Amino acid sequence: MAYNDAYDLPIAVKLLVAGGFGVGKTTFVGAVSEIEPLTTEEVITEASAGVDSLDGVASKTTTTVAFDFGRISLSPSLVLYLFGTPGQNRFWFMWDELSTGALGAVVLADTRRLEACFDAVDFFERRGTKFVVAVNEFDGAFHYEPEEVRAALELKPHVPVTLCDARDPRSATSVLVCLVQYLLAASMTTS
């Protein structure tokens, strides 16, 4: 990657961090962001009972109601702007807006509730947006190999699947590096 020669500025890339409710999107963005991340976390109230399912995430007390925002410089010439999507179906209208201009996405998956990421995978496949699947390895969850997750999600062979700990900045950064490498490789095959 090179600087934007016109202004000697780094290249900025917009990426989404998506997935189902409670898979770790806010945690992921917060772990890698070099700035204080912007979050729209709100306390889960009784008003959402019956609307938002807490199956598998019963201890969750907050939820993203719009988006999360963070920034990470992978190099002096490449800056990633990260937008974490809300996970509940009632906030999915935000996904169309957030995905405008995004070059790619990370779909976070929780193997305890793998079905929670099906909608995100379908969304990006329908739009033709390149994405990687990052299995957030929660404490106490059964360990699955990336190829087992690929088969369960019926992903195409070219879609990268990687393991991560969304709480760990190094692990989350490696997911972003994987996505950028995938985007670069894909752009070279289409040019």
Image (cartoon, rainbow, N blue to C red):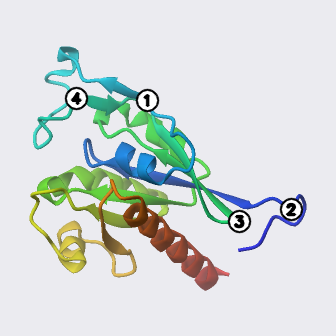
Where is 101 relative to 137, above or below? above
- Separation (CA) of disc 4 from disc 2: 44 Å
Mark 1 or 2 closer to N-term?
Answer: 2
Mark 1 or 4 closer to N-term?
Answer: 1
Where is 42 relative to 16, above or below? above
Q: Amino acid at mark 3?
A: Pro
Q: Which residue is mark 2?
A: 8
Q: Which residue is mark 4?
A: 61
Q: Position of residue 150 (x, y in %)?
A: 24, 74
131 displayed left or right of 188 = left
Mark 4 or 3 closer to N-term?
Answer: 4
Q: Amino acid at mark 4?
A: Thr
Q: Quadrant of residue 13?
A: bottom right
Q: Amino acid at mark 2?
A: Asp
Q: Which residue is mark 1?
A: 40
Q: Which residue is mark 3?
A: 76
Q: Quadrant of residue 92?
A: top left
Mark 3 or 2 closer to N-term?
Answer: 2
Q: Residues within 10 Å of mark 1 (few under 14, many from 20)?
A: some
Residue located 54% across and 70% down the image: 180
Q: Nearer the viewer, mark 1 or mark 3?
A: 3
